[in-house]
Amino acid sequence: MSELSLKSVRKTFGALEVIKGVDLEIEKGEFTVFVGPSGCGKSTLLRMIAGLEDISSGDLEISGQRMNETDPSKRGIAMVFQSYALYPHLTVRQNMGFALRFAGVPKAEIEKQVMDAARILELEKLLDRKPKALSGGQRQRVAIGRAIVRHPKVFLFDEPLSNLDAELRVHMRVEIAKLHKKLGATVVYVTHDQVEAMTLADKIVVLRDGRIEQVGSPLQLYTDPDNRFVAGFIGSPK
Ligand code: ADP
Ligand code: MG
């Protein structure tokens, strides 16, 4: 059974159809990367998985259970945004524990989860700082920490590194790869950075205008793209 399954998923905004029938199976522990031009529907697809957008038709299943109408907080999913979205008036510790506190988890348990995540992300020394006293990369790690403490089945990342400078992006890419290994988590990751896609992905999904153009391993897409469009994104010219 797949961890995440999309069946004929469509999304319309008014008269505009932006996701035009997507079928996709994602296995437990797999690192899947969505690539495609701006406006092709990557964020919309991720937001539907997270429950931040309704699914117009089709089915979303997580661990075999239909989740179309399930509350976002009950899907076993955590999303990490490009803009970090940290609370400026809260410390790192409070930011990381916020969702758990909101869910009524006991204080001692929150402290344990936050410490575990801080250790994984090497944030132990920064727990009492506010976001404005952190670098971009540190803020991004806090944003990831907020997701980790919830022990989601699936992590969703929407262009998490695109606000960082080139050097930090490379560093964080390595960190995310390590994190994936450490946690054995299922990850769906959106990027328009080809190098990120090639180095992080077990499986790359190439999207074009609301549809899947091709799915394959980085090597498959690189050596055997179905068409020029895929080649333009990933592969060598065909
Ligand atoms: P990507 O993340 O690949 O750049 P998006 O998923 O953000 O693309 O957008 C896909 C398409 O859906 C775009 O044409 C965008 O303008 C449209 N869209 C996204 N959100 C909305 C919305 N809330 N209302 C109307 N159109 C939207
Ligand atoms: Mg987007």
Image (cartoon, rainbow, N blue to C red):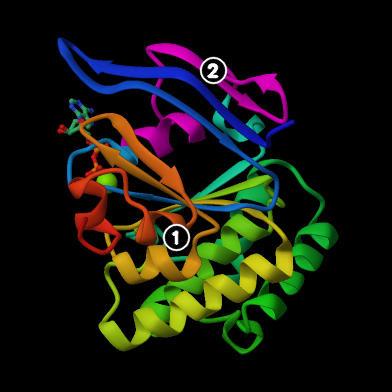
Q: Nearer the viewer, residue 125 or 144?
A: 144
Circle 2 or circle 1, nearest the eye: 1
The relative height of residue 179 versus residue 53 in the rendered view (above or below) is: below
Residue position for label 1 = 218
Label tally: 2
Q: Is residue 225 left or right of residue 176?
A: left
Q: Nearer the viewer, residue 222 or 33?
A: 222
Residue 46 on the magenta span: yes
Q: Tell me residue 191's x, y (percent).
A: 33, 57
Q: Tell me residue 147's x, y (percent).
A: 59, 56
Quadrant of residue 18 in the image? top left
Q: Is residue 31 left or right of residue 198?
A: right
* Type of amino acid under label 1: Pro
The relative height of residue 202 versus residue 77 in the rendered view (above or below) is: below
- Which residue occupies 72% across, 30% down? 63
* Type of amino acid under label 2: Asn
Label 1: few (<14), some (14–19) or many (≥20) C-alpha neighbours in 10 Å: many
The relative height of residue 37 versus residue 174 in the rendered view (above or below) is: above
Residue position for label 2 = 68
- Which residue occupies 51% across, 73% down? 141
Query: Is residue 134 among what the camera can see?
Result: no
Q: Quadrant of the C terminus?
A: bottom left
Ligand 1 image-quadrant field: top left
Q: Tell me residue 120's x, y (percent).
A: 69, 76
Quadrant of residue 1 in the image? top right
Q: Secondary structure at mark 1?
A: helix
Q: Which residues are magenta?
A: 44-70
